[in-house]
Amino acid sequence: MVFLVLLYHLKLDQCEALLNLLLLAPNCLKLDQCEALLNLLLLAPNSLKLDQCEALLNLLLLAPNCLKLDQCEALLNLLLLAPNSLKLDQCEALLNLLLLAPNSLKLDQCEALLNLLLLAPNSLKLDQCEALLNLLLLAPNSLKLDQCEALLNLLLLAPNSLKLDHCEALLNLLLLAPNCLKLDQREALLNLLLLAPNSLKLDHRL
């Protein structure tokens, strides 16, 4: 408990020091200490190094349910600092974060989460598919071809969870990446047409 009380009187260099402590003894943390270290991140987000980002992402795996919205936002920003250091279980954890704080995302965070999908496409659950399809609506122009491919594959995993605006967004994806479609993806997009025939524009029909 003393540990928790002290956190609110820390200066930035002390935050840095405590984050380094986490790297030395990651397994000896208790849940309330995880909570405290996540709060540290909110005090000193720019002082993190890559190995500290990695350590804090691991914290998320230890205490996923004790996160508050501003902590979700902070962890999503971590992803932007260290996108290549993620392991599969960390990808899973960050996708779950999206379900907790879908409206707090900025465009660069959307981009980062779409990249996550490319690293861990098979670990998605249906509610995560739904969440990522919503991401597409927030950042449709920031997609790259491999992200288009990944989102089209999402459609095959969760075809019944689509809403009309998802259909519209996925049909727009088709215009960006027409040659990267596989047969089962084409089948899925044709089924989309049956769900939302009136939402099509002329360029979709072409």
Image (cartoon, rainbow, N blue to C red):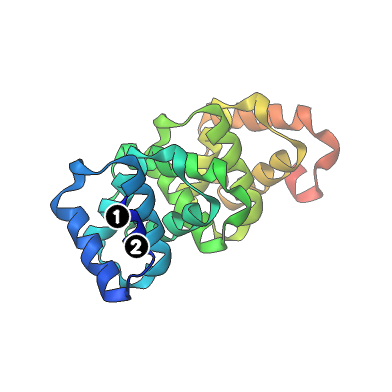
Secondary structure under the numbered disc 2 in the rendered image: helix
Residue 92 coordinates in the image, percent (x, y):
40, 37
Residue 202 coordinates in the image, percent (x, y):
81, 48
> Of the residues shown, which amino acid type is indicated by label 2?
Leu
Foreground residue among 68 and 186 = 68
> Residue drawn 73% across and 35% down?
163
Instruction: Report the residue that reaches farthest toward the front.
Output: 2
- The numbered dot on residue 7 is 2
| Left or right: residue 23 compared with residue 74 | left
> Residue drawn 21% across and 54% down?
22
Front tag of 1 and 2: 1
| Left or right: residue 193 compared with residue 8 | right
Instruction: Report the residue that reaches farthest toward the right.
Output: 198
Residue 197 in view: yes
- The 10 Å Cα crowd at callout 2, few under 14, some 14 to 19, many 20 or more, is some
Q: Which residue is mark 1?
A: 2
Q: Examine the rendered structure and indicate whether residue 156 appears above or below residue 64.
A: above
Foreground residue among 49 and 10 = 10
- The numbered dot on residue 132 is none
> Of the residues shown, which amino acid type is indicated by label 1?
Val
Q: Examine the rendered structure and indicate whether residue 125 appears above or below residue 49.
A: above
Residues at marks 1 and 2, CA–CA distance in whole angstroms: 9 Å
- The 10 Å Cα crowd at callout 1, few under 14, some 14 to 19, many 20 or more, is few
Residue 124 coordinates in the image, percent (x, y):
46, 31
Q: Examine the rendered structure and indicate whether residue 122 appears above or below residue 33.
A: above
Q: Of label 1 and label 2, which has the lower sequence position?
A: 1
